């Protein structure tokens, strides 16, 4: 291949988003509809030409890609990602009237589209460097650079008039509570599902007769839509809570954390159980025979041979389950379970997209963090077999 099609496509789409879509919106207050502002108006001609030149240079780097070209692409893309909020801050500083304290700047479609396409370029360059040139630390360097850059911008006050940050400042105490609730629900669900899933996988491996009905039941549970499952759990939990002082003391009701946790555990069981079962099944029989020949007891074989060899696939199942649980916990806000979904549904009800983003963006960040951290743990646990 003489050129990288992904880089060429992403830079072309980023260029189209920069030229055709609004970069920011101006709102005189939170309720009034925003006025679309183009990149040229918001950032000015020099900054727009600089962005065009950077995108053109990124597109040229797709030709005959090499290690140095991917490194250059990664650096340019990261700097451009940090530069986009700088352009927004510049517009807010120059154009928001001082006599309009409620005026704010929103992020337009062009900003979001360029951010997504540039982030995909970062992923493409990072993966190429990690797979072809063994530079596995590059994604972490990009994450650190981007995080530090955005933190410095926020700490400097340059983005204070951004509507998203204004929503955060008004609700920072509630945000901390909902974030904690979100993490507790998703984490508890995955932990319970992990313990149950490993036990079920071991039981399915030991009993062929149990295997088929178990996976049929878990598959059936997985096919039920989340809102329908929440609704199905409301009636029995309400009945049980009304007749049990213990459940009342635990604050178990037809709505709230209890049905949300049960549903999340139910959805998490299938990926963990299936991955654990497959991982244990795929341990080579010759390795197990060798362990038996060395005089190891069944429990020793499981703990010292079978489980370590199966661990990368089991962690992969946990990664998938945790990402799924983080997303589904947002929906649980509909039944009063709390979490970041509270902001999403409040924003939808008030037609306030910045409030929606206040819940959606941290949810996406949490899912990406879970993906990166558990993916790294999987690679650390995976060892190539020695000849």
Image (tube, helix red, strand yellow):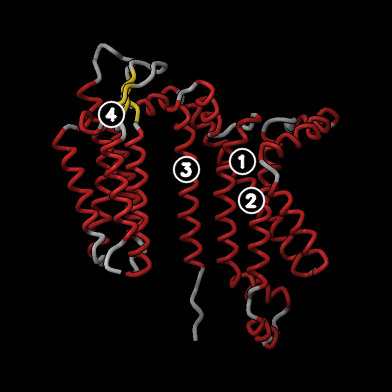
| Residue that protrudes farthest toward the top in the picture | 99
Identify residue for label 1.
Answer: 185
- Look at the numbered discs 4 and 2 and tell me whether their residues touch, using CB distance below 8 Å: no
The Cα atoms of the two marked residues, 4 and 1, are separated by 33 Å
Identify residue for label 3.
Answer: 364
> Which residue is painted at 69% across and 57% down in the image?
197
Nearer-the-camera pick, 209 or 302: 209
Q: Which mark is residue 157?
A: 4
- Look at the numbered discs 3 and 2 and tell me whether their residues touch, using CB distance below 8 Å: no
The Cα atoms of the two marked residues, 4 and 3, are separated by 24 Å
| Mark before the other along the chain sequence, 4 or 2 | 4
| Mark before the other along the chain sequence, 3 or 1 | 1
| Mark before the other along the chain sequence, 4 or 3 | 4
In the picture provided, is 242 more to the left or to the right than 35? right
Q: Write down the quadrant of residue 341 in the picture.
A: top right
Marks 4, 3: nearer the viewer: 3
- Look at the numbered discs 4 and 3 and tell me whether their residues touch, using CB distance below 8 Å: no
Q: Position of residue 59 (x, y in %)?
A: 24, 54
């Amino acid at each position: 291949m003489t050129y990288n099609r992904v880089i060429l496509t992403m830079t072309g789409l980023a260029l189209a988003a920069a030229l055709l879509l609004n970069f920011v919106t101006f709102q005189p207050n939170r309720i009034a509809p925003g006025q679309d502002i183009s990149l040229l108006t918001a950032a000015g001609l020099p900054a727009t030409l600089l962005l065009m030149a950077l995108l053109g240079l990124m597109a040229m780097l797709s030709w005959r890609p090499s290690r140095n070209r991917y490194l250059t692409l990664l650096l340019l893309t990261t700097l451009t990602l940090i530069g986009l909020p700088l352009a927004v801050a510049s517009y807010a500083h120059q154009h928001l009237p001082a006599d309009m304290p409620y005026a704010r700047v929103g992020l337009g479609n062009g900003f979001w589209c360029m951010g997504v396409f540039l982030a995909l370029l970062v992923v493409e360059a990072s993966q190429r460097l990690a797979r072809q040139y063994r530079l596995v630390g590059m994604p972490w360097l990009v994450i650190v650079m981007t995080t530090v850059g955005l933190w410095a911008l926020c700490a400097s006050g340059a983005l204070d008039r951004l509507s998203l940050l204004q929503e955060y400042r008004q609700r920072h105490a509630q945000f901390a509570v909902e974030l904690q609730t979100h993490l507790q629900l998703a984490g508890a669900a995955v932990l319970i599902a992990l313990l149950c899933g490993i036990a079920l996988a071991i039981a399915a491996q030991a009993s062929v007769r149990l295997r088929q009905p178990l996976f049929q039941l878990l598959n059936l549970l997985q096919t039920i839509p989340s809102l329908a499952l929440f609704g199905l759990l409301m009636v029995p939990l309400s009945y049980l809570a009304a007749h049990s002082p213990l459940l009342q003391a635990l604050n178990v009701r037809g709505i709230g954390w209890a049905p949300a946790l049960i549903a999340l555990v139910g959805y998490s069981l299938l990926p963990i159980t299936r991955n654990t079962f497959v991982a244990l099944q795929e341990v080579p029989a010759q390795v197990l025979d060798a362990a038996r020949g060395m005089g190891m007891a069944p429990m020793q074989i499981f703990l010292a041979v079978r489980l370590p060899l199966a661990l990368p696939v089991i962690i992969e199942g946990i990664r998938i389950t945790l990402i799924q649980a983080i997303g589904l916990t947002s929906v649980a806000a509909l039944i009063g379970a709390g979490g970041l979904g509270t902001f999403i549904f409040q924003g939808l009800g008030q037609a306030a997209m910045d409030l929606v983003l206040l819940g959606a963006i941290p949810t996406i960040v949490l899912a990406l963090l879970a993906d990166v951290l558990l993916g790294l743990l999987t690679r650390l646990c995976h060892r190539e077999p020695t000849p």
